[in-house]
């Protein structure tokens, strides 16, 4: 009887030891797994997809990842207001009380916007040779009746045009609206939702079409020439009514970018683009990535049709 009890006691001790040993291993495994997940999360940056500059942002992300092994950059769609992300690329427009905002902005480039028409549209022949003035540009895109000319009589004799535009929330539309100095204005014409490239596609399929686009969409980024099927309405840089030799810069993307960066001409709609993020963001890689883009990523801006960052301090953000 005693022997049996002793064996039972030994069996209990053995079973208990195995149980607690296995339990300890399981807990250790869970802790290790959680620690590993936390480390992986800390090496991940999430960026909201940009409708107007995603190829450039993807290039920055790829080059940063090459230089920082183990870092993962994920792109998320801005489909919900409560979306969780580290960074959003924005355009800068005036906004009150920015200094007290929880959002931090870092300039990482500039975007320029130009008017374009279908290459078969002959209505603007005068503007093609002399350049389009600021009041003419405003009348095209801010007019509620986009197919009217200066008078009903002229309109009856001349071919009409169709403006394709986006909602005021669009980044590219914001650049144009802010350029005109009408913060609450809406651009006239047929509203095209979604990616900015759909504006260009609309004009390509409509011989009467007129729209606007950032340089990355209206130029072929490979040969640096204007995209086939469209023509740029050249903006008259000094509003004089004629294009001088040094102002004939629209046929080549690199020539235009050089002109814009050296002259800082304000006749052509443009503004800073910035990464925005919460000042209290706990992800240590966020500021490191943004600073890398600011210092090293600028070398890719021209390649994708954007200007390099200016030295101006950003004032506001708009998706």
Image (cartoon, rainbow, N blue to C red):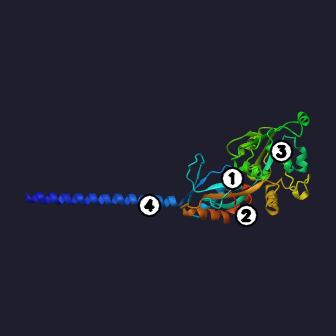
Q: CA distance from mark 4 to mark 3?
A: 60 Å
Q: Which residue is mark 4?
A: 35
Mark 3 or mark 2: name the one nearer the start of the chain: 3
First-in-chain label (4 vs 2):
4
Labels 3 & 2 near each other (Cβ < 8 A): no
Does label 1 or label 3 sit earlier along the sequence? 1
Secondary structure of residue under mark 2: loop
Q: Earlier in the sequence, mark 1 or mark 4?
A: 4
Neighbour tally class for label 4: few under 14, some 14-19, many 20 plus, Cα within 10 Å: few
- The Cα–Cα distance between marks 3 and 2, rounded to whole angstroms, is 30 Å
**Helix, strand or loop under label 1:** loop
Residue placed furthest toward the top? 156
Dot 4: element: helix
Relative to 206, say whether 29 is above or below.
Answer: below
Query: Residue most toward the left?
Result: 1
Residue identified by numbered label 3: 139
Give the quadrant of residue 281.
bottom right
Task: Depth check: give the residue in front, 304 or 92.
Answer: 92
Residue 206 in the image: x percent, y percent?
79, 37
Q: Are discs 1 and 3 less than 8 Å apart at CB? A: no
- Element assignment for label 3: helix
Within 10 Å of disc 3 (Cα), the crowding (few <14, some 14-19, many 20+) is: some
Question: Is there a contact, CB below 8 Å, between mark 4 and mark 2?
Answer: no
Pointer 2: what residue?
312
Residue at mark 1 to residue at mark 4: CA–CA distance: 35 Å
Q: Quadrant of residue 120?
A: top right
Mark seen at residue 53? 1
Q: Nearer the viewer, mark 4 or mark 2?
A: 2
């Amino acid at each position: 009887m005693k022997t049996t009890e002793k064996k039972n006691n030994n069996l209990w001790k053995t079973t208990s030891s195995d149980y607690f040993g296995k339990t300890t291993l399981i807990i250790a495994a869970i802790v290790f797994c959680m620690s590993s997940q936390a480390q992986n999360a800390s090496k991940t940056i999430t960026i909201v997809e940009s409708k107007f500059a995603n190829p450039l942002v993807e290039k920055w992300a790829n080059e940063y990842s090459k230089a920082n092994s183990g870092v993962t950059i994920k792109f998320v769609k801005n489909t919900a207001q409560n979306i969780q992300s580290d960074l959003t690329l924005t355009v800068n427009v005036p906004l009150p009380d920015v200094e007290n905002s929880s959002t931090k902005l870092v300039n990482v480039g500039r975007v320029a916007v130009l008017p374009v028409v279908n290459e078969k549209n002959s209505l603007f022949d005068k503007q093609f040779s002399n350049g389009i003035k600021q009041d003419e540009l405003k009348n095209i895109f801010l007019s509620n009746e986009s197919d009217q000319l200066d008078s009903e009589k002229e309109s009856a004799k001349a071919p009409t045009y169709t403006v394709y535009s986006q909602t005021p929330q669009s980044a590219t539309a914001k650049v144009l609206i802010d350029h005109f100095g009408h913060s609450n204005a809406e651009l006239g014409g047929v509203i095209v939702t979604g990616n900015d490239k759909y504006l260009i596609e609309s004009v390509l399929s409509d011989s009467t079409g007129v729209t606007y686009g950032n340089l990355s969409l209206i130029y072929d980024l490979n040969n640096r020439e204007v995209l086939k099927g469209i023509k740029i309405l050249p903006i008259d840089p000094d509003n004089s009514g004629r294009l001088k030799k040094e102002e004939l810069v629209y046929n080549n993307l690199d020539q235009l970018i050089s002109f814009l960066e050296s002259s800082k001409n304000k006749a052509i709609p443009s503004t800073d683009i910035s990464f925005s993020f919460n000042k209290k963001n706990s992800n240590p890689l966020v500021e490191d990535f943004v600073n890398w883009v600011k210092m090293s990523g600028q070398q890719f801006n021209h390649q994708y049709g954007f200007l390099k960052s200016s030295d101006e301090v950003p004032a506001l953000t708009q998706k």
